[in-house]
Amino acid sequence: YEIGVRLVGSEMCIRDSFQSEEQESVCIACTDIHNEIIDWKILFVGGGCECILYPDKIFQYALRCSAQGIIMIHNHPTGDIHPSKQDESFTRRLERGCEIIGLHLVDFMIVGRDTYHSWREASLVNELKK
């Protein structure tokens, strides 16, 4: 929960940069060993309902920043924060890539108009329900 609040809450205001967007945008936040954000950048901009992503560009950016971890944040211009099948597929792909090159996938977030979805927070909630 803490990472979601830190990223999309009042401290970073990444959400604000996405709220009025009519195009899907993808931001990568690089973290240090303590999961503190050391840099972030919008790497991809797509259309109204999709965005083409290139994992190699994500990893190049993270390695240039000497990141220990990454957080992928993207918006859904419709405001719906529910993950699509493409979101789920890309998350698994990104996780596998991170494991191979030694990065930690800290979170994968979807930003809506007034709220967000965090894979890590959802995983924690599901663990608590078991």
Image (spheres, rainbow, N blue to C red):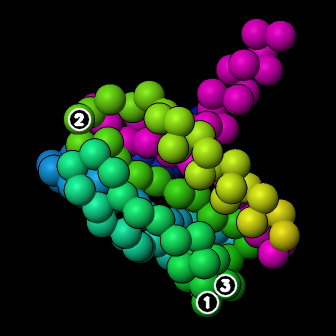
Mark 2, residue position: 78
Say if the magenta span includes residue 119: yes
User: Amino acid type of disc 3?
Assistant: Leu
Mark 3, residue position: 63
Q: Nearer the viewer, mark 2 or mark 1?
A: 2
The span shown in magenta is 101-130
Horizontal side of 26 relative to 56 (left or right) equals left
* Count of picture labels: 3
User: Amino acid type of disc 2?
Assistant: Thr
Residue at (74, 66) in percent of width and height: 97
Q: Vertical placement of 82 versus 7: above or below?
A: above
Q: Confirm whether residue 44 shows in the render.
A: yes
Mark 1, residue position: 64
Q: Label 3 to label 1, Cα distance in Å?
A: 4 Å
Residue at (66, 38) in percent of width and height: 120
Residue at (44, 42) in percent of width and height: 110
Q: Say whether marks 3 and 1 touch (CB < 8 Å).
A: yes
The outermost residue toward the top is 129
Q: Say whether marks 2 and 3 touch (CB < 8 Å).
A: no
- Find residue 27 and report its image quarter: bottom left
> In the depicted view, which residue is nearer to us: 12 or 47?
47
What is the x, y in percent for residue 96? 78, 59
Residue at (29, 61) in percent of width and height: 46
> In the depicted view, which residue is nearer to us: 83 or 8?
83
User: Amino acid type of disc 1?
Assistant: Arg
Q: Label 2 to label 3, Cα distance in Å?
A: 32 Å
What is the x, y in percent for residue 11? 40, 53
**Label 3 element class:** helix
